[in-house]
Image (cartoon, rainbow, N blue to C red):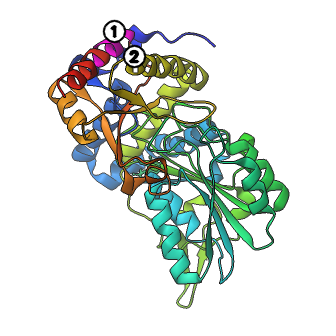
Amino acid sequence: VPAIDVDHARALTPGCEHILHLNHAGSSLAPQPVLDAVIGHLRLEAEVGGYEAAAQEATRTDGVYEAVARLLGASKDEIALTDSSTRGWQAAVLSLPLGPGDRVITMRAEYAANAITFLQLQRRTGCELVLVEDDEHGQLDVVAMAREIAHPRTRIVSVVHVPTQGGLVNPVADVGALCRAAGVTFVVDACQAVGQLPVDVGAIGCDVLAGAGRKFLRGPRGTGFLYVRGSLLEHLEPLAVDLHSAEWTTTDTYELRDDARRFELFEHSPALRLGLGAAIEHALGWGIDAIAARNAILAEGLRDRLRAIPGVSVHDQGEYRCAITTFRVDGLPAAAVADELRRRGVNVSVSVASWARYDLPHRGLDALVRASVHYITTDEELDRMAEDVAHVASAR
Ligand SMILES: Cc1ncc(COP(=O)(O)O)c(C=O)c1O
């Protein structure tokens, strides 16, 4: 794996000069090509009109589907563009057939928005929500998952590739192989994985996968995408459709589009989509394998530094860990630690129990400080972060 030219990557990132940003899992710092794409198109809209600008740039905006498809190893027809990860995830999940007694399998790392949607589906359809336990590594237990997948009433399996609340990387491909063999629909939330880890829908074996642009892909806020396997697509009727997802063919009939864009609605921001496309090209330019390799070293370097500080504990789980690091300082609320770090010019975030109810309370945790590195992070920044955390911890 070739090394990343970090100086060059930072030179292309205006935000690096102002802030020690360790919140790439929240929303990363956009690189210059993303800024240029978004601002350039807004300018064009102002000059020629929004619809006219879209028509002028139609080939480039269409190329964004192709870029997402390349990122995920999918075909362009299997991609819908959305304004968030949840929007895509929900559009697909809410279209899956479910009835009373059908089983939906989830795991401890489940994201709050997904869990809430499943609770809503449980109320609406009478389906049963089943929670798979973690194994000794703190990742989903594949053996327990295999038992649930084999159950004749299991319809949907939902796995979060990388959770919001830790460095865990769930064994998605193992689950995918089991789902493929059983003919069960496999839904992957790859929101925190895309841009920092290789995410290939063929290798994972998923039917549905959603991601966001603003996190490790470094795209603009308000962007996301959905993958739906081509062979599943034609059987799914989206819950919400409009004149873009479908055509009003006679006064009494409509016909859904035959590609994944049936999950989109008409209105969108071409500027943001072009920004997403630029972000994906930027990431692919560095190479996802190179990004993943550098991030693994940086995150482990941060964990080592944090573990060495008296009163600080690190809480990341899983056999393989990624760019997200979570920790707490004894005797201090996570929010107070994050506030103090922010005052010192360091961006981190806080993962709270209500965002990860199957997980954090289960581990006896109410909240964790989340520091997420990315390939533009330097060792000097990690040293500074460690100094700042040590200061906060010693001032308890
Ligand atoms: C694991 C995971 N899934 C889904 C989401 C939701 O993404 P969005 O806000 O783009 O819908 C997040 C956001 O933090 C997340 O961490």
Q: Mark 2 and mark 1: span between their CA atoms?
A: 17 Å
Q: In the figure, 318 relative to 65: above or below?
A: above
- Residue 100 is drawn in which quadrant? bottom right
336 or 228: nearer the viewer: 336
Q: Which residue is mark 2?
A: 308
Q: Position of residue 251 (x, y in %)?
A: 52, 90
Dot in front, 2 or 1 = 2
Q: Residues within 10 Å of mark 2 (few under 14, many from 20)?
A: few
Residue 278 colored in magenta in the image: no
Furthest-right residue in view? 181
Q: In the figure, 327 relative to 80: above or below?
A: above
Precedes in sequence: disc 2 or disc 1: 2
| Secondary structure state at the residue bearing disc 1 | helix
Furthest-left residue in view? 343
Please, what is the three-letter code of the amino acid marked with disc 1? Glu
281 or 168: nearer the viewer: 168
Magenta highlight range: 379-385
Q: Which residue is mark 1?
A: 380
Q: Position of residue 248 (x, y in %)?
A: 53, 79
